[in-house]
Image: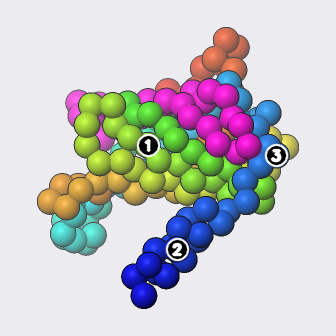
Amino acid sequence: MARAFAVVLSLAAGSGAQGGTWDALLTNSHWYVPQENLLAYMSNSTSFTTPPPISLWDQTLWSLGTATDGRFTGASQATFYVSPEVSFSSTTSILGIATESGQIRMRFTPTSGGSPVIGIGQFRDVNGTTAMQMQMISGQAGEAYTTHWAYMLPYDPDSFSPPALRP
């Protein structure tokens, strides 16, 4: 029975058909959070109501390498501003996959140690631009959780600077 369960689990994990549909868009690309999606929330890990969650600003930048058959790697730099006096940053490596249907799954592994963060999403058209609509929640038991939903938009770092955070 355990072996049959392991086989089913293994097949389910690899069942998302991937391919090269999104490779050209992802390869050597850069992504940012637009101004209207910078808001994120943080709560403690034992209650989402006491104390109430706090709002913060989250500007995340992605730099992706070569995408092949929907699989890609990259790096991420996130800066979180709670107030002008309180901020923190996170640098991670990215391992991701985009399926033919446009579903996206990414694992963000902190470069300084810690638990990976999982992001899930879908490619969407936003005013004529292909965006990644993404959702993540991060944190560990006994610590705070941060959740953020955003459209990630592509940009050229040679001709565009992502919006500055306004805590």
Q: Which residue is mark 3?
A: 21
Q: CA distance from mark 3 to mark 2?
A: 28 Å
Find residue 7 and name its label.
Answer: 2
Q: Position of residue 23 (x, y in %)?
A: 76, 38
Residue tagged 1: 108
Q: Nearer the viewer, residue 150 or 49?
A: 150
Check the image and name the residue furthest to the right.
128
Residue type at mark 1: give it: Phe
Residue depicted at x 45% and y 53%: 118
The type of residue carrying mark 2 is: Val
First of labels 1, 3 by sequence position: 3
Circle 3 or circle 2, nearest the eye? 2
Q: Position of residue 55 (x, y in %)?
A: 35, 52
14 relative position to 81: left or right: right
Q: Residue 158 lies in what quarter of the image?
A: top right
Q: CA distance from mark 2 to mark 1?
A: 26 Å
Query: Circle 1: is it few (<14), some (14-19), or many (20+) Cα within 10 Å?
Result: many
Q: Is residue 126 above or below residue 62?
A: below
Q: Which segment is the magenta one? A: 62-90
Q: Which mark is residue 140?
A: none
Callout 1: helix, strand or loop? strand
Please, what secondary structure does the residue beneath circle 2 have? helix
Which residue: 44% across, 34% down? 93
On whether residue 74 falls in the magenta region, the answer is: yes
Query: Where is residue 165 shown, x and y percent of the image?
Result: 45, 32
* Residue occupying the far left of the picture: 142
